[in-house]
Amino acid sequence: MLETKIQLNEEGDGKILIEERGTEIAFMEISIAKNFITVYHTEVNPSAAGRGLGKKLLQFVVNYAKNNDLKIIPLCPFVLAQFKRNEAEYTDIWAK
């Protein structure tokens, strides 16, 4: 069973991670400051590749941004590519 959660330190730096049976198999490095979430990097363990975990992380950060009135700064190449491919879907949360 997969569990997705967010871990942040007091400064707002941290990650969104997906665990399977207590083992981290994918993560997204993020930082939250003011009204923005900056996404720096997304990584999926090679043993978990092909399961759509990158997109699950993306959906989690998008939902988090929408629920907390935040905009996303997509510095991560994966997230930026998804935003560009589906621009209309992310217009309300994309800090261009």
Image (cartoon, rainbow, N blue to C red):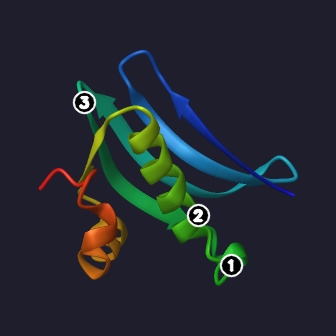
Mark before the other along the chain sequence, 3 or 2: 3
Kindly indicate the quadrant of the structure image that contains residue 74.
bottom left
Q: In this view, does 1 lie above or below 35?
A: below
Q: Residues within 10 Å of mark 3 (few under 14, many from 20)?
A: few
Residue 19 relative to residue 62: left or right: right
Q: Between residues 70 and 22, which one lies in front from this camera angle? A: 70
Q: Would you name the residue on which mark 1 appears?
A: 51
Q: Which of marks 1 and 3 is in front?
A: 3
Q: Between residues 45 and 84, which one lies in front from this camera angle? A: 84
Identified by mark 1, the residue type is Arg
Residue 51 relative to residue 11: left or right: right
Q: Would you name the residue on which mark 3 appears?
A: 35
Q: Would you name the residue on which mark 2 appears?
A: 56
Identified by mark 2, the residue type is Lys
Identified by mark 3, the residue type is Asn
Q: Quadrant of the C terminus?
A: bottom left
**Cα–Cα span, label 3 and label 2:** 22 Å
Residue 48 x %, y %? 70, 74
**Cα–Cα span, label 1 and label 2:** 9 Å
Mark before the other along the chain sequence, 1 or 2: 1
